[in-house]
Image: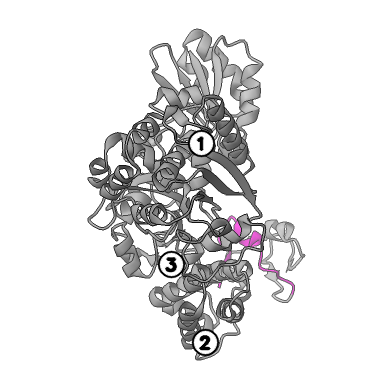
Amino acid sequence: MRIVIGQGSCGIAAGAEKVRKALLKQDIGAKVSVTGCIGMCWLEPIVDIYDDDNNLTRLVRVGENDAQSIAEYIKTGDMSAIEGLEVSKEDSEFLTKQTRIALRNCGIINPEIIGEYIERDGYTALKKALGMTPEEVIEIIKTSGLAGRGGAGFPTWFKWNAARQSEGDEKFLICNADEGDPGAFMDRAVIESDPHNLIEGMLIGAYAIGARHAVVYVRAEYPLAIKRLKNAIAQAKEEGIIGENIFGSGFSCDFMIKAGAGAFVCGEETALIESLEGHRGMPRLKPPFPAQSGFWRKPSNINNVETFANVAWIINNGGEAFAAMGTEGSKGTKVFAVTGKVKRSGLVEIPMGKTLRDVIFDIGGGMKTDKPFKAVQMGGPSGGCIPAELIDTVIDYKALGATGAIMGSGGMVVMDESTCMVGMAKFFLDFTAKESCGKCVHCRIGTKRMLEMLERITKGEGKDGDIELLEELCCSIKDGALCGLGQTAPNPVLTTIKYFRDEYEAHIRDKKCPAGECSDLIQYRIIADKCRGCTLCARNCPVNAISGTVKNPHVIDSEKCVKCGKCYQSCKFGAIVKE
């Protein structure tokens, strides 16, 4: 019997390490191991118990105080000992409706033990690829239809082939693990949970393009991912998988990790290269493209973590098997980080061609509030809001692009009716304005001017013509910005204006926030006929803005009120209204 504890960053943040330590103090007579992110973030901490026949009992939302009950169950087999901890059918509903390729080992193997990866056919794809010519490897990737999973969806084989054909004795293969989108954690989870899968995919890519050097550029805010990747690289070196004459093939490749300082713009490949070289992360003019002149002006290829995480599976199973999934223009599967107002938040991997409804309602379980679904932000700050009426939009590059959003790296933020769409646009624009590298005027100044307008609008200071001016600015920035950050920064604004123009008009014309989220545009009022004078609202008010005597109607002083909503939340009689 063995116990496996989910210890991705989300699990540890929820208390999984405390659970592990508590279990180790118990005399349970079972091996206690760890795994990475299982993907079911809303159920963390998760403890999986496997019996001698490998049958699984999954316990969720486990606390350190539950260790004794778990020990009792393991000793006696009495299910009543863990009553209340055992998972419902939610885990099967969440996992069985997915098709996991990039995430196939996540939550199953111990990411710190290379042997567990090898037991699941790890590095067999590398051995197979080294028995082919680089051109044959690229042809398999071409057949698969694998496109870059970092957002642009550019054909992977084309980038590999361009780097392969570039002249030069020294070439570099680079993994972009600078995952900066708010709400996105796909790449982090893959590195934390299955680092050898990334290494294997990169080694195959390095062989295909003729690179002796592989570099992983990962943001410094991912300390656990860096730790486990360093450990995996060391183990692979010990096994002769990284280094000189790999598997006796004559192919040699070394690995380096670069911890980035956390600049969103370094997700753009030329800005990433600048940062790698020790310069400020700012994009270069293209052409030349990295395939011709990249890291240290040498031919270089850059793909993101999820792209490489598919490579070993494709080599082992054939390009045709991967291409059989998805749609005509978007092959294979895609990983999404589903967050926001959804019941089952976490990592979801599905074949392209599923709909937003499939992910949000069938797999994600729908809204976790009683309020109806309103929109989903796809693609992070570079993406756009897709409204409820387009919930049946197919998930592929073309269909999502037609809505004004993009696939992006896979962030999916779900919103209900309580979300202000003007506020949402302001949130993402605030992010991109701060993350602008400042190199080009359109992005540096344009995003700042747009943000100022959105701030005015959400404060009730909007003017007639602001919407039209925003649209004009959006188009100018998209046309004039140097890199993808500036070119896509207007997307959240453009899509919210397109689908929720009435909310902008209400903010400007009526000085009201329909969602009741913009604090400057809402007021709290006590209905005298409903107020029982219980004083609960007054006791909860942090600024003493509510006055009244016991058993008599109370009054809110609008001048003192900071609109925190505590009175509204505490009233048990529905006497306080938000207007």
As rendered, which of 174 and 358 lies closer to the eye?
174
Please name which of the two marks, 2 or 1, marks the residue nearer to the observer: 1
Q: Which mark is residue 466?
A: 2
| Residue bearing the label numbered 3 | 384
Magenta-tinted stretch = 560-579
The quadrant of the rendering that contains the C terminus is: bottom right
Residue with the mark numbered 1: 195
**Callouts 3 and 2 close, C-beta under 8 Å:** no
Magenta residues, dominant SS class = loop
Q: Amino acid at mark 1?
A: Pro
List x then y, in percent, for residue 304: 47, 51
Circle 2: element type? helix
Picture residue at 63% right of the left edge, 75% below the top: 520
Q: Position of residue 545 (x, y in %)?
A: 74, 68
Q: Which badge, 3 or 2, comes first in the chain's sequence?
A: 3
Q: Secondary structure at mark 3?
A: strand
Which three-letter amino acid code belongs to the residue tagged 3?
Answer: Gly
